[in-house]
């Protein structure tokens, strides 16, 4: 498991290749990359600032990753999340999962993203024509996370 | 002594990123602490929001979570990372 919270940009292609190169027993690599869009909620977005809770951020991502490793037979799991100033088109988040077969990697990747979006302490503030604006949480993200809750 | 931190929109609304509170023995839960802060009035009403999230010692929790001397508490709006 690898968790990185960083200001610097990253190259998603390099990260995907590294996940496979690390272990030829890997039969499946699934990755999710989230990007800054130039449009959100009907407004043009000129970039954003990502605030976080230093200390808790890393702990919460590690906790989510650990739960994924306990629920699916993964060979590796990597999470990268950026903080600070981001421009449209830049990658924000990377989740990469590897396993022997595809199902575990697919499900674990979706699980980590759904939990990250609802449990990791990050907050986006977008630059719009009307000024900087905090992004509000969405019910659809809560619903997506709930599908993984155990009975 | 309890350390309280505020993040994102709450930090901006309060003009404060955190504070130390003493004389907190009467506060049994995080909700007691929140009510104590709401009683300050004015901008503190932001903590009355229904979708407020909170953490105790850097772990997400509910407002019913017990509060203990020396705890580090955080209040923040719904998270929006990813």
Image: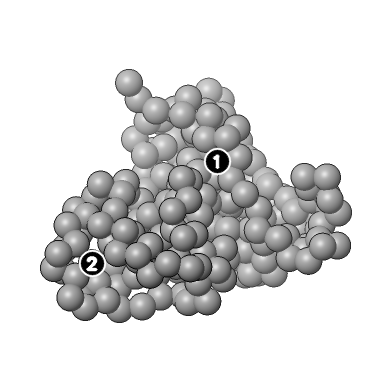
Q: Residue at x 46, y 60 (%)?
A: B45
Q: CA distance from mark 2 to mark 1?
A: 29 Å
- Where is residue A149, by image quadrant? top left
Q: Nearer the viewer, residue A91 or A127?
A: A127
Report the side of A28 relative to B40 (left or right).
Answer: right
Q: Is residue B31 above or below residue A69?
A: below
Q: Which residue is mark 1?
A: A113
Q: Is residue A122 visible?
A: yes
> Where is residue A124 shown, x and y percent of the image?
64, 58
Q: Are marks 2 and 1 on the same chain?
A: no
Question: Chain for mark 2?
Answer: B
> Where is residue B75 shown, x and y percent of the image?
41, 60
> Where is residue A122 shown, x and y percent of the image?
54, 57
Report the side of B58 relative to A39 (left or right).
Answer: left
Screen quadrant of the N terminus of chain B: bottom left
Report the side of A74 relative to A135 (left or right).
Answer: left
> Where is residue A10 shown, x and y percent of the image?
68, 61
Q: Which residue is mark 2?
A: B71
Q: Residue at x 53, y 23 (%)?
A: A103
**Callout 2–callout 1 Cβ contact below 8 Å:** no
Label 2 or label 1, whichever lies nearer to me, is 2
Local crowd at mark 2 within 10 Å, few (<14), some, or many (≥20)? some
Q: Is residue A129 above or below residue A34?
A: below
User: How many numbered marks appear?
Assistant: 2
**SS for dot 2:** loop
**SS for dot 1:** helix
Question: Chain for mark 1?
Answer: A
Local crowd at mark 1 within 10 Å, few (<14), some, or many (≥20)? many
Q: Nearer the viewer, residue A54 or B41?
A: B41
Q: Is residue A23 visible?
A: no
Q: Nearer the viewer, residue A78 or B47?
A: B47
């Amino acid at each position: 498991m690898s968790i990185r919270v960083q200001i610097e940009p990253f190259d998603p292609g390099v990260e995907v290749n590294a996940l496979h190169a690390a272990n030829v027993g890997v039969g499946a690599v699934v990755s999710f990359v989230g990007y800054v869009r130039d449009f959100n909620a009907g407004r043009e977005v000129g970039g954003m600032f990502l605030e976080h809770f230093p200390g808790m951020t890393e702990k919460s991502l590690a906790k989510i990753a650990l739960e994924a490793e306990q629920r699916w037979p993964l060979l590796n799991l990597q999470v990268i999340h950026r903080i600070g100033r981001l421009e449209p088109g830049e990658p924000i988040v990377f989740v990469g999962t590897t396993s022997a077969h595809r199902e575990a990697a697919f499900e674990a990747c979706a699980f980590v993203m759904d939990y990250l979006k609802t449990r990791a302490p990050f907050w986006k503030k977008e630059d719009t024509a009307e000024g900087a604006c905090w992004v509000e949480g969405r019910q659809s993200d809560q619903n997506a996370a709930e599908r993984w809750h155990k009975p | 002594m309890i350390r309280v931190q505020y993040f994102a929109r709450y930090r901006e609304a309060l003009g404060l990123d955190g504070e130390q509170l003493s004389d907190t023995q009467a506060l049994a839960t995080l909700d007691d602490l929140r009510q104590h802060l709401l009683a300050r009035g004015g901008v503190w009403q932001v903590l009355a929001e229904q979708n407020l999230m909170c953490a105790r010692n850097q772990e997400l929790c509910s407002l019913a979570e017990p509060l203990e001397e020396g705890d580090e508490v955080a209040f923040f709006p719904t998270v929006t990372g990813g």
